[in-house]
Image: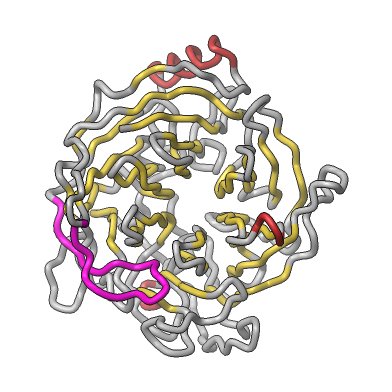
Amino acid sequence: MRYGRVARAGYGAGSAGTAVPAAAVTGVSGRGRYAAGGSPAGAGRRGVLAAVALAGCGTLLVTGCSQGGGALPGGSPPGTAAQQAGSAAPSGGATASPGAQAPPAKGEVTVTGEVAKGLESPWGVAPLPGGDLLVASRDKGTISRVSVGSGAVTEIGEVPGVAPGGEGGLMGLALSPSFASDRLVYAYFTTESDNRIARMRYDEQRAAGQQLGAPDTVFRGIPKGLIHNGGRIAFGPDRMLYAGTGETGDTGLARDRKSLGGKILRMTPDGDPVHGNPEADSVVYSYGHRNVQGLAWDKDKRLWAAEFGQNTWDELNLIEPGADYGWPEAEGKAGKPGLRDPVAVWKTDEASPSGIAWAQGSVWMAGLRGGRLWRIPLAGTEPVAEPEAFLQGKYGRLRTVVSLGGDRLLLVTSETDGRGSPEAGDDRILTLTVR
């Protein structure tokens, strides 16, 4: 089941002299949203996998099958949000760019290849210069390098201190904005006491399995639980580090401005609060979130985030610095004064969103329980059509989407996370072209 009784740790001191508020958090129980193994599977999925296998598994393919014909509408009529985020000094209202061309109402997804298969609990992905990938295994606590040419998977090292359990473990990955010179890989992970972010130097000259340097913790004290650990990290256009966190099932943390749970955080690469954040000496960028696992910026540097609802609505939100996104006071579009409504919502059995990416004028959102890839076409901040669903039931639970530029995406499945129905070859990384 999705929920259980959770014991949580308090906060520790922040790094680099940042004081992190202390709080005592007690365990609570919640309502289950779905049972384990709830991802769609069946003949349709097996047929697609067989077709990919015939084309040559484990390598980067150049042909594939189009999934553009059977798109299903999803969600309720989108609403509005305001404010851009991600620039060096967040400000102003978010509107369509002058002369911006809206994407077509109907999109298309073509699976062009299978980069890798046989991965165990893949979560975060970081593309390297040259095209290879770093992939985090949530439950093993390791980072591996995937060759996009051969599909070979080579473990580069284990992240010390990872304590997997429930929805926790080794999750988001991001490369330093100065990776070409500093070779630093950032990771968000669960320990015995908290969720934290550390960076490690990646030395390709060392032996396989020993290529990660000792972790340097840049930020600690994010609440942990068996559920709702957030976990996505990304560097924004402003070269600052953003992190999505969860409220661990303790709903009161989400709107508690002194808590780091149920938030989007913004910090320097060293883990310090950024000048211009909503509150001085705080990394909290937005609050009132339930469990943020998707972060992406559009071409105008606006920040978008996907998060899990409880039993009714999952959400895609446009993030405004300092805004309250309402959980647990609101789920979905409540229209309540002072709370930000999502731009689009989905029934929880259609989505359970994790990673998102921006490409071709749309946000692309991976669905776990929904087992499908969602497209939300946008003109500025306004959807131009209902969200479309692709790949429904073809590959099972979908965890991470990564933009490779232009019309190319990576898509990571999540059938081996304890809630899927893994088949031979799971989990996989697929390449897509989209419009």
Name the spot of residue 239 as percent of width and height, x first: 51, 66
Q: Residue at x 62, y 23 (%)?
A: 58
**Is 353 positioned to the left or the right of 282 in the image?**
left
**Is 380 positioned to the left or the right of 32 in the image?**
left
Residue 350 seen from this side = no
Q: Residue at x 39, y 87 (%)?
A: 279
Residue 88 in the magenta stretch? The answer is yes
Q: Residue at x 22, y 52 (%)?
A: 345
Q: Is residue 350 above or below residue 51?
A: below
Name the spot of residue 396 as percent of width and height, x first: 44, 32
Q: Considering depth in this image, is 371 or 324 the residue closer to the camera?
A: 324
Q: Residue furthest front?
A: 99
Dividing the picture into quadrants, the one containing residue 84 is bottom left
Name the spot of residue 53 as percent of width and height, x first: 55, 14
**Is 43 positioned to the left or the right of 25 in the image?**
left
Name the spot of residue 138 as percent of width and height, x first: 61, 50
Q: Which residues, given as a range, are shown in magenta?
A: 78-97
Residue 78 seen from this side = yes
Quarter of the rendering occupied by the C terminus: top left
